[in-house]
Amino acid sequence: MADLIFYHHKIKPVHLLQDRDSEVRTTFELKSLARMVVDVTWPWNILWSDGAHFCLNGHFNTHKCQIVSAENPHTIHEKPLHSDKVIVWCGFKAAFIIGPYFFKEITANGIQTCSVTGKRYRDMLRDFEIPQIQQRRCLQDIIFMQYGAPRHIDRRVTQLLRQHFTDARVINHHFRTAWPRR
């Protein structure tokens, strides 16, 4: 996502790297290359995962974005503070896609979207993702990647990941293989 430029909307995502980031990223890349020398299937077994918010009114999140425009840079872009949105998770690896999974809860008013907490994320992993991987009979080969948002490092989530993937088969900055920040 950080490499995409949305020309139509004139928005360019920006991630501010810190001084130590280059060293950490280089170390991660060298360790990954060394793993591929030992096991050429390693990168093909990574299940890449992430979630996204989609606003139902057509607006999109510009967090971590910089607006680039030839027009007045001080133009105000109004948008609702709490617009209706849907939160979607997906995981994929070379051979298949798992998802999409829509975070929702059943209320007196029917099905509602909800925020993603550590408990809800753990429930999604336990009740949706892991059974899908088990159906494909490849749980013992999967390397689970997540970037380390607060809900990803919730105690309940890390326990579940260690139980099903072991510490060695999770890429996250709170596990043995640390996914670089930013």
Image: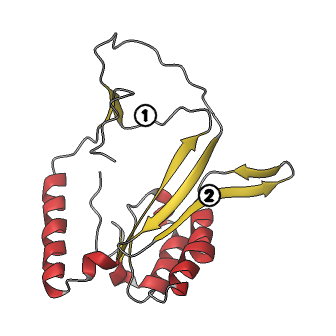
Q: Residues within 10 Å of mark 1 (few under 14, many from 20)?
A: few
137 with respect to 181 (left or right): right
Choose between 92 and 28: the one closer to the eye: 92
Image colouring: secondary structure
- Residue marked by disc 2: 102
Q: Which three-letter amino acid code belongs to the residue tagged 1?
A: Thr
38 left or right of 65 in image: left
The amino acid sitting under disc 2 is Phe
Write the residue at 18% across / 80% down: 35
Image position of 90 (left or right of 72): right
Residue at 62% x, 63% y: name it: 120
Q: Say if 112 sits above or below 30 in the image.
A: above
Q: Indicate the secondary structure of the residue bearing disc 1.
A: loop
Please say if 156 is above or below 21.
below
What residue is rendered at 12% in x and 70% in y? 30
Label 2 crowd (10 A; few <14 / some 14-19 / many >=20): some
What's the distance in space between the residues labelled 2 and 1, CA to CA?
21 Å
Furthest toward the top, the residue is 72
Q: Nearer the viewer, residue 5 or 32?
A: 5
Residue at coordinates 39% horizontally, 76% vertically from top-left? Answer: 95
| Residue bearing mark 1 | 62
Question: Residue 163, position in %: x, y?
Answer: 49, 85
